[in-house]
Amino acid sequence: MTLSHPLNRTTFGNPNDEGNLMTLAEAELLLNTWVKNEKLVFHMQQVGHLMKSYAEVKGYDAYTQRLWHLSGLLHDADWDQWPDDHCRKIIEELEARNQDPRMIKAIASHGPRYFGVDPDSEMDKMLYAFDELSGFVHAYSLMRPQGYEGIEIKGFKKRLKDKSFAAQVSREDITDASQRAGITVEELIQFVIDNQLRGVV
């Protein structure tokens, strides 16, 4: 991912909108209207699923689970049609819809090296972490006859060191996201493996 300019903002959304969140159906409509690339749709569904799964494991309430889910589901919604305006377009759309500022902030900070916004909250940090790892795990599963079944951390980490494999995935960002989240790369990998959406896209 490349971006010629950071967002140059420190606040996102309106604090008064906290508690306002679109339904899953509304989010899916936005996603399917904006994104035509099936692989990108699948990636966003994967990240949304991981976010929701993590919130469930943490025992968060239903609203918080949906907040986490939609943050993952919509984080790359503008990448397909507006790659040069990535992140800015979806942020402006969600602000215009008076959405919960916590979701907007999480999306704004899912690539700190590109957008210049640091992930601060737990949700911010986990979106950053799952975004980086989910695609790599899926790419690894596709090269294995048994897919996700039986993936071992040792074999996965070997591929992670192979810079030619899934070269578009930044190893630097994976390490950075792990450190910011305070969770080891191994633990993150295992969670992604155990909770990843299965698919062949």
Image: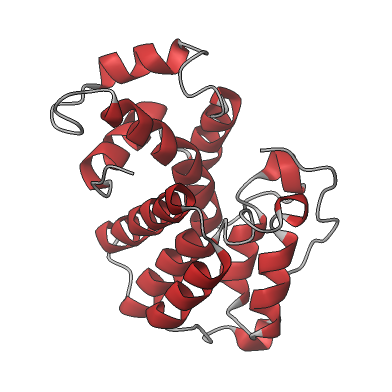
Rendered location of residue 195, percent (x, y): 25, 47
Looking at the image, residue 6 sits to the left or right of residue 164; the answer is right
Quarter of the figure with the N terminus: top right
Q: Nearer the viewer, residue 60 or 151?
A: 151
Asked if residue 33 is positioned above or below residue 121 in the image, the reply reads: below
Q: Is residue 13 visible?
A: no
Query: The C terminus lies in which quarter of the figure?
Result: top left
Residue at figure coordinates x 40%, y 40% from the top left: 134
- Above or below 191: residue 10: below
In depth, the one of 127 and 134 nearer the eye is 134
25 vs 123, left or right, is left
Name which quarter of the figure residue 155 lies in.
Answer: top left
Residue drawn 57% across the image and 67% down it: 34
Name the side, left or right, on which 53 lies relative to 101.
left
Which residue: 27% across, 15% down?
154
Q: Name the spot of residue 138 as percent of width and height, x first.
A: 34, 36
